Structure formats: C-alpha cells, structure tokens
Amino acid sequence: MGREKLSLDMGWKFHLGETGLKIGKGHGEIYALSKAGSQPGAPQADFDASEWEDVQLPHDWSASQAFSEENVADWGYKPRGKAWYRKTFRLPEEYRDKKLVICFEGVATHCTVYFNGLAVARSFSGYTPFEADITDMAHFGEIPNVLAVFVEADEWEGWWYEGAGIYRHVWLEAMNLLHIDRDSVFICPLEDGVSFPVKGRENSLTGDAGKKPEEKSVWNVDISMELINEGDGEKEIAVQFALREPGTDRSVRYIEKSVVCQTGTVEFSARFAVENPLIWDINHPNVYSVEVTALCEGEKIDSVRTVCGFRTVEMDPDKGFFLNHQPLKLFGTCNHQDFGGLGVAVPDNLWEYRIEKLKEMGSNAYRCAHGMPADALIDACDRMGMLVLDENRNFDSTKEGLRQLEMLVKRHRNHPSVIMYSIFNEEPLQGTIQGRRMAKRMCRLIHRLAPGSLTTGAMHGGILTEENAVSEVDVCGINYQIDEYDSFHKRYPNIPMLGTETTSTFGVRGCYATDKDTHQIASYDDDPSDWGNNVRDTWRAVMERDFVAGAFMWTGFDYLGEPTPYVWPTVSSYFGMLDICGFPKDGFYLAKAVFSEEPVCHVLPHWNFRGQEGRAIRVMSHTNCEEAELFVNGRSMGRKKIDIYAQAEWEVPYEAGTIELAGYNNGEEAARDVRETTGCVQGLQVIPWRSTVKGNGQDAVPVVIKAVDAEGREVPDANFMTEISVEGGRLLGACNGNPNCHEEFLSPHRSIFNGRCLAVVMPDEDASNLKVCVKADIMGEAGDGGSGFHSISADAVVVANPAERVPSVPSVTEYYLARWKISKVFKERPDVMMKIEDFDMNSWQDISVSRESGSPDSLENKQGHYLIYQLQAQIPKRVNGHLPVLYFHAIWGECEIYINGERRGTCSYEWPCSYSIPLNERETGAAEIRILVRSLNINAGLDSMVVLR
C-alpha cells in the first residue's frame, strides 16, 4: 500500500476561550506534568469535551460572532481571542509501520498542536501550511488518539480581517517509511532555446520578448525530487514519471529510472523532451498532470501527483510583461481571502466563483494580498487562466521566515498560473540597507527553489533611494506613486516595473449620493483615497506607458475590516470593484471598458428617483466605444466623443421612464445599455450560481436573492428584511454588500441592500436536492392594488449530484482512561485507599492500559497476591447524551472498583472479561478511581482499555 490521504475536517469539538484548567503546586503533580505526553486538559484522552460545540472544518469562529464597537476596526469589529479544537479518532493496525503526518493548510493565527498529550507542532503564521509528525506517538487499533489544537487568534499579522481558527483543511497522510517528499517534486518545462531567469534580474530577460510563436516547438522538462528513507538499510527504488494531457489519463511522456536509496534523503532528477505540447495561456489554460511513482521490487510504495503547464514568462524593462513571447498588459486586482457571510472559512469551489467574476470584468491577474493563499485558489487560477502574483506574508529572513517562504514556493512553483513571487508589502525597511540584505537572502532562496521564477516586492516608498530592496528583486513593485513611474524608469532603465498596488477608490454598490453621516459613498469614481487614484487616472498612467507591465487595483472585492475612510458603524471596506458578495459595482464596468477589446457600454445611475421629478441627475458613461449618446425616454441628450480615461457626463432633469446609452464605433452602434424606472417591489427572485452542486460535503452554492417588480425587473433601490430557509442543506452564511450592516452571518434574517443580497448554502450528505426558500413582509403597494404590508416569497432548487466524498477519518466519542498508576505487589490484602505521598515518584509505576500492553507482569504466576490500580480522571457529565458508563474491555481476577473512596463494583473472572458500571451525577467531574486486584491464577488486572461510554 502506498500513500493515503484522509480528511480530518469532520467531527471536531470546539471551545471558545481557555479551559480554565488549574494546575496544582505539589511536587507529584509538577513532576508528572513535566513528562512527555502529559500536557493537561484538552490534550488528554479523558478530558470532558462533551459540552463543547460540534463543528466541521473549515471553521472561522470570529465570523460567527457579533460585531461590536469595542473590537478593532481593522479586523471588522469582530472579536478574536483564544480557543480550543479537539478531535478523537482511531488509526487502523495497518498504519503501525507507516509514517504518519497531520497537514494543516491554515490556522489563524498562532497555534500549538497536541497529539496524545504531546506538543507536536507550533505555527506562527495563519497563512502558511504546516505539518505535525505523529508517527512515534500514535495508538493503533482500539485505543483512540486525541488531536487538540490551541489557537491564539489574539495574535495578528495584518490590518484587515484575518479570521480565527482552523479555517482551512486538515489532512492525515499515511505513507511508507521510504517515501517521496511531496513538496520536493519540481516540474520545470523549458522551451528549447529559451533561458529562464536563474540568478536574479541580470539573467531574467530572455531576449525573446515579441518572438512569434512557432508552429512546432520542443520543450525540455526538468524534474527533480527527493526520496526519504526513514527505515533501516538501503533499497533500490525505481522512479516513474508520467506526464498526462489536460483532462485525460493518456500519458504523453513516460520514463523510469532507478536509484539506490540509503537511510536519509536522496535527490533525484531527470529530463525528457516533449514535442508540440498544448500551451497554457489565459484563454487556453491547458494544465498537464504529472504523477511521480516510487516502486520497490516492483511494488508501488508511494505516488505523488502535481501539475505543470507549458508557457513562458518574460519581463522587459521597456516593453513590459510577455506571456508566451506575446505582450500582455497585466489587468490585475489585489484581494484578501474572506468571502461575504463566511469570513475566511471558504469552501474550495467558491474560489471559482470569485475568479469567474474577475474574468467577467476582463481581469487577467490576481495578487494574493497579503499572504499565502489557499491551494484551491491557485488550482482555480490554473484551470481558469488567471495569472497569479503570489505573496509572502512576512518580510523575514530569519530561519522561521525563510521556512514560511520556502513552503510558499514549494507548494506553488509547479503551477503555471503563478508568474511571480512578492516577498513583502509596504515594509518600513524596504528603502534601507537592512531591507536590501533581507530581500537578497529571500530572493536567493526563491531562485534556488524555483529557477526561472520572477521576484518582486510591493514598495510604497524608497524606490529612488540609494540603498533599497529594488536592487535585489527582479521586478520593482510600486504601490501607488503613479507620478513616479517616469522618474523610476529614467533612473533605473534596466529594471522592469509593475504597479503592484494601485487605485484605492471608494464606492458603495447602488449608491449615487455621498452621505458622510450615514457612511455612504457615491459610485462615480470621484473619491480616491489620499494616497491613491481613481480607476480612470490609474489606467491612463499604466496604459500610456509600455514600460509599466501592468497594475493591480486595490481591490477586486470588498473585504471585512479596514473600513477606510470611516470607522464604526462601518465594518468592511469600500475599495472593491465588486462588493463583498461578488456583486458588481459601477467601477466593475469602468474597469471592464479599459480591459476589454469587445465593445462595453454601461450607464449610471439607476433610474429610480421617485418624488424627485425635475431634479438634475448626473448621468455618466462607462464605455470603450469611440462615441456615446444618451437617450431619455427616446430623446437624445447629446452625442459625445469618448476619452476612455475621462468618460462622458450629462446633467439630465429626472423624469420616470428609460435612459439608454448607445456606444458607437466607426459611426455604427456597437453596444447599448438601458436603465428603466421600475415599479414597487412585488416579488423575489432566487437565483443559484449553478443549478447543480456536488454532494461531496465540501462544495457550496452562492444564491442571489433579488427584489423585483411586477414585470420581474430588479428594483435597485429596494431595502427590506427577508427570511431565508434551506431544505436538504444548511445556510453557511449570508451577506448583502452594505459596509454598515451588522446582521449576523448565520442568521436566517438578511436584509436586501439596494436590490439584492446573497446566501451561501451547502447540501446535506444524503440530499438529492437543495431548496432555498425566501420570504418577506414589505410595506407598499401590493399586486392586487392594496397598500400596507404584504407578503412575498420565492424559492429555487439546486440539484445535489452524487459525488464521491473525500475519504475521511471518523471521530469517536468514547473517553479513553489512559494514565494509570499501579502499586507494588502485596502478599496480604492492602489498604486500597492507602495514601500516595506527593514526593514518592518510585513506589507507584505509571502505565498505559491497552490490549497491547496487557496485564501487568508483576502479578504473573503470583496466585493470591494483590495490587492496586489508581487513576485521577475527569468524568464528563454526558457521553452521547447520557450519563457515562465506566466500561472495562477486559478485566480479570477478583476485583473491587472504588470511585472517590466508595466501592462501586466487584467482579471475579478467572480469564479476561468485560465489565461495566453505570455512573451517577455526583461521580462526574474530577474523580479518583482505584481498583484492588487479587490474582486467581496465572495473572490478573486490566488486560485492555478502560473507557467511558
């Protein structure tokens, strides 16, 4: 059997806060707690977690908490703090000779992982995956294992909403002692005759920018990896590489080589040629799969799968960015990782939803601000053709900082979507000699791990100083400072440059009048931050300069926290081209007009201004057509030439009806957009993102809820409360894009904001259909002509397709009583309640009771002799909903069982048998259990596990 990967996402217990554990000061307790596996409290098998909350990962506890002005604005006024997670599970006997690793994809923010009472891992970044090797501490068979994670989310890494808890997946990997180092596998396709950057900027330009694509091409694929032998003795290993075409299992290239693998680590490499591969680009994202297999004596002992893509990436200091030798302006956005109504615990398939929205806008590049993203995001970018600027969270060249950077590069270097690594964002040391030294060390690590990769750093100052990080990165990343583009290019003509962060303009979806008292900002692209620019000025600066490779707008999506330019009651940002739900703001269409080659025509505002007849309304175009003409109820308000970076405006007296914007190219109409005055709200529309969802327990569906009039038109100024219910599934969260909304994410009550809101739902395990029902009582004119309150409702069904569920490790609910003491052997009956002196470390022996350990050797062949078992335990109030039962899997001899000094049971077995004692309320909590055992024949005592059921 080779490698197995099992999900640990299900069946966790969660406790918000610390456990309040009190540790005694006596010598005996201090001595005992100083030993391996003795961490008290939640990490112990007998800890009572029965009243803790049941949760499923990914889990962000902060998202489910209420907003409060007492909390920090940067973190969205959500609480953070500390918490415990706990999972109890068994491991099969066939894992006994395996290497076992628990892989955490992300825990916010600092945490300590305990396994069977021992601290096995610590993490100091909420963005970087980490592993815990549990091989030596694992129990197998009937004895359960306890995995406990203490999360310290009051530690922070950013000035935005970071969430709290185990918010990404957790996996158990079981592999042979001789195995492939999963993250060591590096696939580097190199077009014949093209040299990738290896040592830094001096070698980062291939000289092939603008080269015409060849009809026939040959690519050399370099593969390197490491084999680790943690067993005894050397083994001869055959290593196979299979390159498979996108979407198939057909191997287009297959090789096999042999290597002698001694104890330790062995590096292995190979090269093969591929003729005329399918090229990866943003419109044809052809992703190849690579399987690396290790065999010993013809038997597969390990296998690892990864991906690769055939594409070239180049940076020219005068001409900008090139993909596959063709110039490509980077139309990018910066994005944090939270999702409306969910926080940072985002189901994997929702990254497709976000990338799909950005692609609709015409964006082709995604900056992971400001830390290592989820693997599922990178996978989605590979499949959907979105270029990635990958970013490290911490500017740090210490051992821990370089470990985090190494994890980032190793996990993402094979992905064709990843074009560049950013080693920092807006660091005070960026313009100093210290920052330069740090950047040098970090960039050297990246180039060593991923030859051919480009590096940058996002600098908000110091780009023109004598000593700065610019001299060490391949591409100078400039945050804002668009007025310095020309100065930088003049001073450093050989250094490519990129707008790593730009824009920072404010706006609220559906808002067309700024009101500082209510924290509403109009969407006319008029309100950039003091340090930023509006959308139009940003892209004028970028598009008029070939040497600027592109730009990443702050931001694609709104996000929780950093509610600039306001504070409470605002809880989320205003920067996005889309709101936090993924609903487009008007800036979305302005950016689309810049990014798109096809005609784009969008007019704002909406045309619902009841009671304001005759008032002058500001009307604005967002179009890339040569000319635009505005019509009001069929009458032309004038035709204007379009400067795409200025747009056209009209002042129009309001009258109900229709406004239309027509765009013209070469004198012919190329596109048209219409706004109509709608009627009052008469109904709802419930529109799932997709009509089907995989019933795999992991995929979710965003559902748009719209307010509509009698003709089915969305009412863009509608604002009222709805009630959401789900049949055949559950509500993961809901949101509406209002930066000032304080409604709880998990509440079924969610207000429509400016015409719409969003619910995210997930089907139950056995459901075939998922039904989302929405209803509301609203004030206004009813469809029958009456007035006052009337009810409206709508629903939609999503088909839950049967899908193979991810193999997982189930949790168990028994409490294993593990840490016993046994006395010496007595010839005569001893006092079962004899005092154990606090300073006596040697008269009583610590033992772990299990079938594997069996009965104590000290009573072997000592018929008629006695000994005493003693245990300090925490008895839970309930196990599986009832008072616990003390259950002995195998006990023998003449036995008396005492709980807190009271004899609660007796049994007499010549051979090991099971025995149970139902417990009462007064025996729950802290308890002492003693067992007096008298041997009846060849041995006696506890021959297997003792549990609470």
Image (spheres, rainbow, N blue to C red):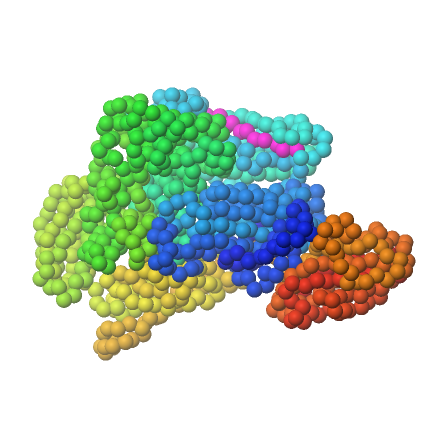
Q: Is residue 539 visible?
A: yes
Q: Which residue is drawn at 16% across and 57% down?
A: 659
Give the position of the C terminus as an image quadrant.
bottom right
Determine if residue 852 is in view.
no
Q: Quadrant of residue 464?
A: top left
Quadrant hosting residue 210: top left
Between residue 886 and residue 644, name the one nearer to us: 886
Identify the residue at horizontal 32%, vertical 36% (top origin): 500
Q: How many marks?
A: 0
Front residue of 52 and 538:
52
Residue at x 59% of width, y 57% of height: 22
Percent across and percent down for residue 676 are 19, 60
Q: Split into 4 quadrants, where in the image is the N terminus?
A: top right
* Residue 264, position as x, y percentages in the image: 65, 30
Q: Magenta stretch?
A: 218-229
Question: What x and y, as percent, mark residue 853?
Answer: 77, 51
Q: Position of residue 278 (x, y in %)?
A: 44, 34
Taking the spot 75% from the left edge, 56% from the top edge, the residue there is 836
Judge from the rendering whether residue 106 lies leftward or rightward of residue 301; answer left or right: left
Residue 134 belongs to the span the image colors magenta: no
Main secondary-structure element of the magenta-colored stretch: strand
Q: Is residue 823 above or below residue 905?
A: above
Residue 225 lies within the magenta run: yes
